[in-house]
Amino acid sequence: MNKPRFFITDVFTSKKYGGNPLATFIDCESLSDQEMQQIAKEINFSETTFITSRRPKDGGYDVRIFTPNAEVEFAGHPTLGTAYIIREKLRLTSANEVALNLRIGKIPVTFSEGSAQATQLWMKQMPPQFGKTLEAGILARVLGISMSDIDPHSPIKEVSTGFPTLIVPLVNLAAIKQAKINKNEYFSLVKDAWAKVILVYSRESYEPSQNLSVRVFADFYGITEDAATGSSNGSLAAYLLRHRTFGTSNLEVIVGQGYEMGRPSTLALRANNSESEIEVFVGGSVVHVAEGVWG
């Protein structure tokens, strides 16, 4: 039996050892669900992906995504990183679009070539769904912050563009840095909740080129904190547009994430109103780091 090959990429960064690391496996058709889950646990990145066929099906490549604890329907940085591997390592083509068949459905990824900077990848996410609005006091306890750290002008809201996320607006960068999950309060909150991931954001940022600072916590999936999260930031884009946070009917913002983890990441968000729904796009760069054979 052939041993599966893997590739390591850093996603949402223009250099190695920034952004969010991803392991992508090919030649893994013979792996069982349990073996894929075990590999993801041993690698212990926020997600690991498995391309289960070298040949496209229905215009897309079958891909599965595992966190250390569970398989998930969709996640952002694995979608971009895997699309990069398909184009650069499997297809060896300059095609400007690759589609992934994920459990949630087909997700197209487009490549925008830039001569002065790394190639930018963009994925269109699912139309957003909006869930419950929560009280600030509950999240203050979960995040170990005071009520005054939470922005009272914007709601605390469940949103999903493929991965349900609880969006929590904070007043400044100091509040972002202070946030620290109280695990007992967190698991009590998410036990029966739709959104089990918490994204906190502030309009005060680390870099002048960024519009927002973000942190994402997902202990339920075995991820204490994520360095760059395309799925949750897609939910954030839908939230920002719906609530006119920047006062415009179209959204284009740059997000900084991962600074507290020493893995600075940059994500680009776009959202607009198209007919009866919000369209959301998340973009960023991918860098190849390493490759090898597993086992």
Image (cartoon, rainbow, N blue to C red):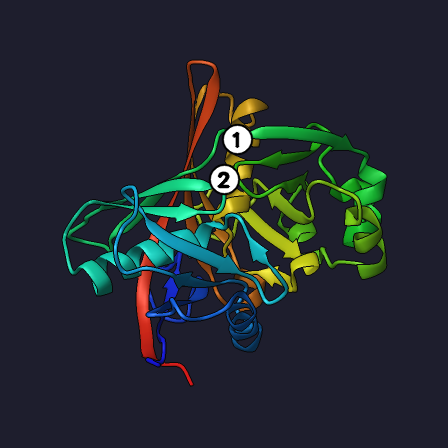
- In the picture shown, does residue 281 fall above or below 175? above
Q: Using residue 294 as the reference point, say whether residue 75 is left or right of it.
A: right
Query: Looking at the figure, which quarter contains the C terminus?
Result: bottom left
Q: Using residue 96 as the reference point, say whether residue 38 is left or right of it.
A: right
Q: Which residue is mark 2?
A: 234
Q: Residue at x 36, y 67 (%)?
A: 9
Q: Are marks 1 and 2 in contact (CB under 8 Å)?
A: yes
Q: Using residue 117 as the reference point, say whether residue 271 is left or right of it.
A: right
Q: Residue at x 47, y 46 (%)?
A: 255
Q: Amino acid at mark 2?
A: Gly
Q: Which residue is mark 1?
A: 238
In this view of the protein, can residue 212 be seen by the observer? no
Residue 139 falls in which quadrant of the image?
A: top right
Q: Residue furthest bottom?
A: 295
Q: Amino acid at mark 1?
A: Ala
Q: Residue at x 32, y 80 (%)?
A: 2
* Relative depth, front residue between 253 and 79: 79
Q: Residue furthest top?
A: 275
Residue 114 position within the rendered picture, expressed as x and y whole percent measured from the top left: 19, 49
Q: Residue at x 41, y 70 (%)?
A: 30
Residue 24 position within the rendered picture, expressed as x and y whole percent measured from the top left: 39, 66
* Relative depth, front residue between 113 and 75: 75
Query: Looking at the figure, which quarter contains the N terminus?
Result: bottom left
